Image (spheres, coloured by chain):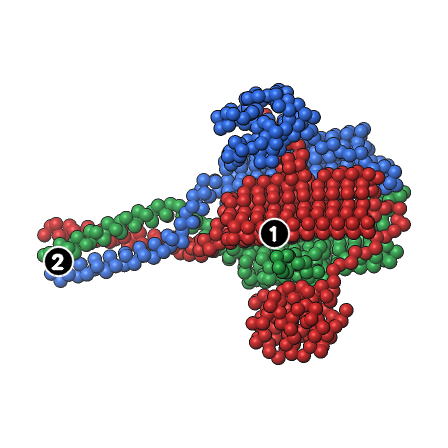
Chain colours: A red, B blue, C green
């Protein structure tokens, strides 16, 4: 897979600054990189590593060239994307291994299930009655695809994934190990002291090009569908409540929880461990900082943070004010005394005057 | 499953307002509903959808009839419970499919395990030595029921559920995919720099009528039992520490964590992403708002929120005060100047006087 | 397993206070304990239970002997560790049951995989091509060990554990049910509106003596390795981002999330539901209180809490100040009025004077 820096530059849409003749065959971090490695600088935090890195070439933005004019650099307007391209070129995507055959424990597939062409279904997965799997899917061991569930083309279900009955995955959906799609939503009507289960008769729909990290869980809707919009990506341990509607191209960081019936627009970014209550609307392009607790609708375009979540500037001002608070409490007590003293003095001034 | 609105009304304990002759066969949301659908209004937030909904009938409370006097309404004192009944009548609960047979990968069941009558044990589950499964249980693929574990009657274990050795489930327990009952608690005694594992020799007990969402995990106790009380319901990704004692009829929303040895009373409601530290007691009927961090015992009956959790009114007042804080800091600085100015002026007044 | 209190004392390095002749055979809590049980007092909170407990012997620290001079006590400098020793002596560690044989559903093991000696590989696990398993490992059903993954000696993988391709576990690693090691990290370069996946070509390395609770997930690195240091212990549902480097002997409580590329030192303790943003450094011995949100590097040795995390004393002062805040806002308004009043009065004094 080795190639010259010059060759790589062409493949990733970068221009070479310095000598493009060196051969590189691997992408890695600035600190670990050696002469046959390509690294990148996309986070200012690592600027100081640029000079000392042993990397054969470093991908930088045009404005960062001046920081290491003597190095071989690959200059790209979007260095992070260029690095991504370099990883694709030099390493490629994971190749799924050929399943072990002849074990006598092949996948258990209902005769009424339909499996598309060129699928790789590992031993010890279970495809229930009426399920439909598209073409070129990869289904690892211990996956359960429930009755009448639909999986599109080119999907990957890693080990131990569960897709409940009647749920639907679009094309190119990738679910990492332990994901669960379509478990019953948290719906109970409390009656005479019992929490009576409301049958969850809806389903969950995961649209095209969604990827989820490990152990993400998406409730099925009570009625209708819980929906994850196309191109949306989840990190790990994300929980989506029943009837929620996550828009397209969202990014949900690890351990986010979205309450039932809530909706997000397009390109919403939700930081780690954020919680969004139920029945809310988050507008397009909203960005919610890690750990925020969203208790009201949030207009699109803004940045939000805090508990309850507010516009981020406000949250920040609040935090700053709060760090000053203990001191201010003390100063306030002093000021109260000074005012009391003034009042006393002024009274005595007035008393003297009236005594005049 | 279709029936007239009149017929449905009888089944769900509602009275018809308007024409009860239409036929309905499905429950759905106000926005999606058509003329053969039943919908409901239980959240004020959706009041405005009532007039425009295409639903054949809408379940409402008596006080909401006036909002749409021209519609066909199903009037019930508890519209949410009536809707639940309608879902049960028109849709029913999930029917578990007949397992695929003849795959050669049947469930692996130890000869010393006891399986009750009329159970559905799917291929590729594992029932270890000494385990006891009650009658009419459904055990999906990739479930592990450990040595000497006990599962009561009418339980459902969805795919990829793990029940550790000696743990016990009551009757009618439903565990969604990925749940883990009885893993070792987080117990280490740090000694000469090593975190020495304390054997977790207790177990976990899940009482009757408990339901857990996907990927909930319940530690086994160090000694004795971790206990989840009857009728309690968890949403997804809930974590219960070793030796905790969750009372009956609790509702724990997604991503809640309860620390080891903590106890909750009856009918406690715990909002999403709440954390409760270890060794605490939460009283009966306490309600804890989403994201709260509970660091002390909480008396029963109250509503709590915030980090650390306090009575909710206090938390709210604190939040309101905090939003005003940045402004107040500025005003405070001004006030300090004004007081300093007053002091100066008063001094000069006094000086003039003493100079008289 | 029964033995006299005297015998037990020798085994656990304690001295007997009172009559060491009684026979004990079980460890349990103070409240549940009977005459053949050993209990312990390590948390002041339970002091009052000491007198009333029915335990045959109670392990206490030297300073606590005076609290129950009439009881049979086992006195140890570190009562918690002594209790741990007692649990080991009287109960021992879990014995893994002999796998069910003859089911026809044996483990599926690639011919190129290497399994060490004396391993227990349960039916229905999957060991992919090139994987290496050390000696004396126990691999429960429904575990997936990916291509070229390495598992050291004496490891235990409970049910439904997934280890991705090329990931490495050291010796004596214990992964509870549902853990996932090495799923793809959350890496996308957004380009022309698409979140383009960056192939995650690194791996995840879990060093010796690490234990993880149920459903913990560790991302593989984009390049290089995500690393969990030796002797570190996780509770349940912990999420580790790609490229993170968790130091040795850390303790991470349930539902902690550590962002990508962040590093922790040695003996760091991270409370439940803490979130640490990406690209941060946490120093040796730092302690982070439950629910904190870490947004900046934290020096070693300190205790931190709050959102964003600050030195714990500051956080506490902030909380105290905040509880006083609503009241202070009111007092502040009053003070403003008093100052305005003073200004008016002083003006009139001055006016009178100038009128003199």
Quarter of image, res B71? top right
For the N terminus of chain A, the quadrant is bottom right
Label placed on residue B330: none
Identity of the residue drawn at 71% across and 43% down: A168
Q: Are marks 2 and 1 on the same chain?
A: no
Query: Helix, strand, or loop for circle 1?
Result: loop
Label placed on residue A250: 1
Q: Position of residue C89 (x, y in %)?
A: 74, 47
Q: Position of residue C38 (x, y in %)?
A: 68, 42
Q: Nearer the viewer, mark 2 or mark 1?
A: 1
- Please rate how many residues cluster around mark 2, counting C-alpha atoms within 10 Å: few if below 14, some from 14 to 19, many from 20: few
Identity of the residue drawn at 70% across and 74% down: A5
Q: Position of residue C341 (x, y in %)?
A: 24, 49
Identity of the residue drawn at 68% across and 29% down: B91
Residue A327 can be seen in this image: yes
Identity of the residue drawn at 55% across and 50% down: A284
In the shown orientation, is residue A324 left or right of residue C354?
right
- Please rate how many residues cluster around mark 1, counting C-alpha atoms within 10 Å: few if below 14, some from 14 to 19, many from 20: many
Q: Which residue is mark 2?
A: C354
**Most foreground residue, B303 or B195:** B303
**Most foreground residue, B240 or B106:** B106
In the rendered image of this protein, does residue A234 appear above or below residue C247? Answer: above
């Amino acid at each position: 897979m080795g190639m010259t820096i010059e060759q790589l530059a062409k493949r990733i849409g970068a221009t070479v600054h310095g000598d493009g003749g060196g051969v590189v065959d691997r992408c890695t971090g600035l600190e670990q990189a050696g002469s046959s490695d390509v690294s990148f600088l996309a986070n200012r935090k690592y600027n100081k590593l640029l000079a000392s890195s042993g990397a054969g070439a470093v991908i930088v933005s045009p404005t960062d060239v001046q920081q290491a004019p003597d190095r071989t650099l690959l200059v790209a307007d979007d260095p992070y994307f260029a690095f991504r391209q370099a990883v694709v070129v030099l390493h490629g995507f994971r190749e799924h291994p050929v399943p072990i055959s002849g074990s006598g424990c092949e996948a258990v597939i209902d005769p009424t299930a339909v499996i598309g062409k060129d699928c790789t279904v590992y031993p010890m997965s279970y495809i229930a009655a009426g399920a439909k799997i598209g073409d070129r899917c990869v289904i690892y061991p211990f996956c359960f695809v429930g009755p009448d569930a639909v999986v599109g083309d080119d999907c990957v279900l890693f080990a131990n994934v569960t897709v409940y009955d009647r749920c639907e995955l679009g094309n190119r959906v990738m679910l990492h190990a332990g994901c669960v799609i379509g478990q019953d939503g948290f719906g109970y009507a409390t009656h005479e002291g019992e929490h009576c289960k409301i049958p969850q008769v809806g389903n969950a729909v995961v649209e095209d090009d969604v990827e989820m990290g490990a152990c993400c869980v998406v409730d099925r809707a009570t009625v209708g569908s819980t929906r994850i919009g196309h191109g949306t990506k989840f990190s790990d341990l994300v929980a989506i409540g029943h009837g929620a509607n996550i828009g397209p191209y969202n990014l949900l960081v690890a351990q986010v929880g979205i309450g039932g019936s809530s909706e997000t627009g397009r390109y919403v970014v939700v930081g780690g461990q954020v919680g969004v209550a139920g029945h809310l609307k988050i507008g397009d392009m909203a960005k919610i900082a890690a750990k925020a607790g969203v208790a009201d609708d949030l207009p699109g375009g803004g940045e939000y943070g805090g508990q309850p979540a507010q516009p981020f500037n406000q949250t920040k001002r609040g935090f700053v004010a709060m760090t000053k608070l203990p001191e201010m409490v003390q100063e306030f007590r002093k000021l109260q005394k000074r005012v009391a003293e003034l009042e006393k003095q002024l009274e005595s001034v007035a008393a003297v005057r009236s005594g005049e």
